[in-house]
Image: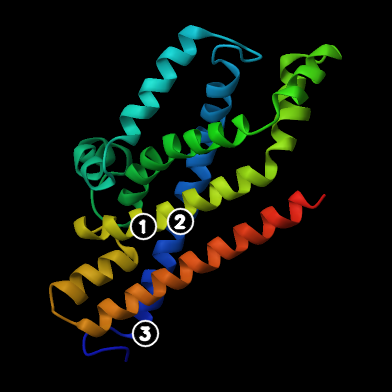
Amino acid sequence: MFSTTVTGEQFMQAIIETIQMVGISLFVGSLIGIPFGILLVVTRPGGVLENRAVYAILNPVINIVRSLPFIILLVAIVPFTRFIVGTSIGTSAAIVPLIIYIAPYIGRLVENSLLEVNPGIMEAAESMGATPFQVIRYFLLPEAVGSLILSLTTATVGLIGATAMAGTVGGGGVGDLAIVYGYQRFDTVVVIATVLILVVLVQGIQSLGNTLARKIRRY
């Protein structure tokens, strides 16, 4: 027993649920957010695929979604969540707002990473006759890989924090354990244990991301 109210199996199940929420949300959010980030860079004024209309729509939409605190977003889209997964509580229900929360966040992080690429590289590629797709595929993205890894690491850490907040409305995972057993039942041991679990997860992911980025930048 970890405490007077929670067993080791419950802790393990909560960790698994948190990893599931983070993994699925990060994967789907990346499928949406990475293209968003690329579009923000290539369609902006002076970009290789300059399109003021696309940029003028996409940029404020991302800003609006990002401006919403996750806990408010979580509650605001309950009807949509219920429509998608058939329920507004549990791990599967938490994944829907997590994806909506993280996709524009990843998009903005990817945009910042790509903007760090030396413009001279892009100009050299265009001068050699590379098409916009070739510039993006063979020059822009490869040059930004190290920074992109760090951006996804930051997004993952943010997701872990968001999954903890999802616990306030029965989202499952470590956050739910902390609220139901730690806060509502005044079990300090559970609260401390969940904090330690989250710290270990965050430190592990951050260390892994830093190591991968460092190795890639050496090549």
In three-dimensional space, the C-alpha distance between marks 3 and 1, rounded to whole angstroms, equals 22 Å
The residue wearing badge 1 is: 161
**Horizontal and vertical percent position of residue 129:** 84, 11
Q: Which image quarter holds the N terminus?
A: bottom left
**Horizontal and vertical percent position of residue 159:** 41, 52
Q: Choose the circle earlier in sequence order: 3 or 1.
A: 3
Say above or below: 160 vs 56: below
Identity of the residue drawn at 54% across and 8% down: 51
| Left or right of 131 in this view: 59 | left
Identity of the residue drawn at 20% across and 68% down: 179
Say above or below: 94 vs 175: above
Dot 3 falls on a residue whose secondary structure is: helix
In three-dimensional space, the C-alpha distance between marks 2 and 3, rounded to whole angstroms, equals 24 Å
The residue wearing badge 3 is: 8
Q: Nearer the viewer, mark 2 or mark 3?
A: 2
Labels 2 and 3 touching (C-beta < 8 A): no
**Horizontal and vertical percent position of residue 128:** 86, 14
| Mark 1 residue crowding within 10 angstroms, few (<14) / some (14–19) / many (20+) | some
The residue wearing badge 2 is: 157
Say above or below: 2 vs 122: below
Say above or below: 85 vs 66: below
Q: Amino acid at mark 2?
A: Val
| Left or right of 124 in this view: 148 | left
Labels 2 and 1 touching (C-beta < 8 A): yes
| Left or right of 202 in this view: 76 | left
| Mark 3 residue crowding within 10 angstroms, few (<14) / some (14–19) / many (20+) | few
Which one is nearer the viewer's eye here, 175 or 12?
A: 175
Q: Choose the circle earlier in sequence order: 2 or 3.
A: 3
